[in-house]
Image (tube, helix red, strand yellow):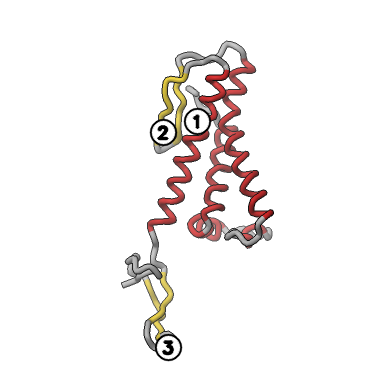
């Protein structure tokens, strides 16, 4: 049985067992998955989608449009309004508010990681040799990187493929 350092049972995919130096425990390599990193990524995703939609809604309210509700779905979120604003510039400001939040999070995380080098961060991904498998691994091992990635993808996706209603 594969067990992590906290005693949580994994997916039973461990190999190369060896006795520890003091002879009191067996150590091994393990591909055991843990639910916590996946749930963290999911919470970051839905949390970021919610705040993204909240930013759309706050700008909408500032433009005197009534927001009925925010709906979160597995494919994203929607801020439901009674009517669209009359001025094209108001509509643009409402549309851009969500992605701006996402890119603000990305910027702040990059600034934080630059200012505090001791923070856990997959610096090896930024040396020019990016392997998709390493990105996937980093998303599960580095929570700050996962938050950055989620917000970068949400912001870019929403800018490139805006969806109505907002």
Q: Is residue 47 above or below residue 10?
A: above
Instruction: First in sequence, mark 1 or 3: give its number.
Output: 3
Identify the image quadrant of residue 97: top right
Residue drawn 39% across the image and 62% down it: 33
| Contact check, label 1 and label 3, Cβ < 8 Å | no
The local secondary structure at tag 2 comes to strand
Determine the secondary structure under disc 1: helix
Tell me the crowding category of disc 1: few under 14, some 14 to 19, or many 20 or more residues within 10 angstroms, Cα based.
many
**Earlier-in-chain disc, 2 versus 3:** 3
151 vs 162, nearest the viewer = 151
- CA gap between label 2 and label 3 equals 52 Å
Q: Earlier in the sequence, mark 2 or mark 1?
A: 1
User: Label 3 belongs to which residue?
Assistant: 22
Instruction: Give me the disc on residue 81.
Output: none
Q: Is residue 147 left or right of residue 14?
A: right
- The N terminus is located in which quarter? bottom left
For the point 50% across and 35% down, which residue is it? 51
Q: Please state which of the two labelled residues, at mark 2 or mark 3, is closer to the viewer.
A: 3
Name the residue at 65% across, 44% down. Answer: 107
Q: Do tag 2 and tag 1 residues touch (Cβ < 8 Å)?
A: yes
Residue at mark 1 to residue at mark 3: CA–CA distance: 55 Å
* Image location (x, y in percent) of residue 131: 58, 59
Q: Which mark is residue 72?
A: 2
- Count all numbered tags in the image, as a single digit: 3
Circle 2 residues within 10 Å: few <14, some 14–19, many ≥20: some
Q: Is residue 153 left or right of residue 46?
A: right
Residue 116 horizontal side relative to residue 75, left or right: right
Q: Badge 1 is on which residue?
A: 53
**Mark 2 and mark 1: Cα distance apart in space:** 9 Å
């Amino acid at each position: 049985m594969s067990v992590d350092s906290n005693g949580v049972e994994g997916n039973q995919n461990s190999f190369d067992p060896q006795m520890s130096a003091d002879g009191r425990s067996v150590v091994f390599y393990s591909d055991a998955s843990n639910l916590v990193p996946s749930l963290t990524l999911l919470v970051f995703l839905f949390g970021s989608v919610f705040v993204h939609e909240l930013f759309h809604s706050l700008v909408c309210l500032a433009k005197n449009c009534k927001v009925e509700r925010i709906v979160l779905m597995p494919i994203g979120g929607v801020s439901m309004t009674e009517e669209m604003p009359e001025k094209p510039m108001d509509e643009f400001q409402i549309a851009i508010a969500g992605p701006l939040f996402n890119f603000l999070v990305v910027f702040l995380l990059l600034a934080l990681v630059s200012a505090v080098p001791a923070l856990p961060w997959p610096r090896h991904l930024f040396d020019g040799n990016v392997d998709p498998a390493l990105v996937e691994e980093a998303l599960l091992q580095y929570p700050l990187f996962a938050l950055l990635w989620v917000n970068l993808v949400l912001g870019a996706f929403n800018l490139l493929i805006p969806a109505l209603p907002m």
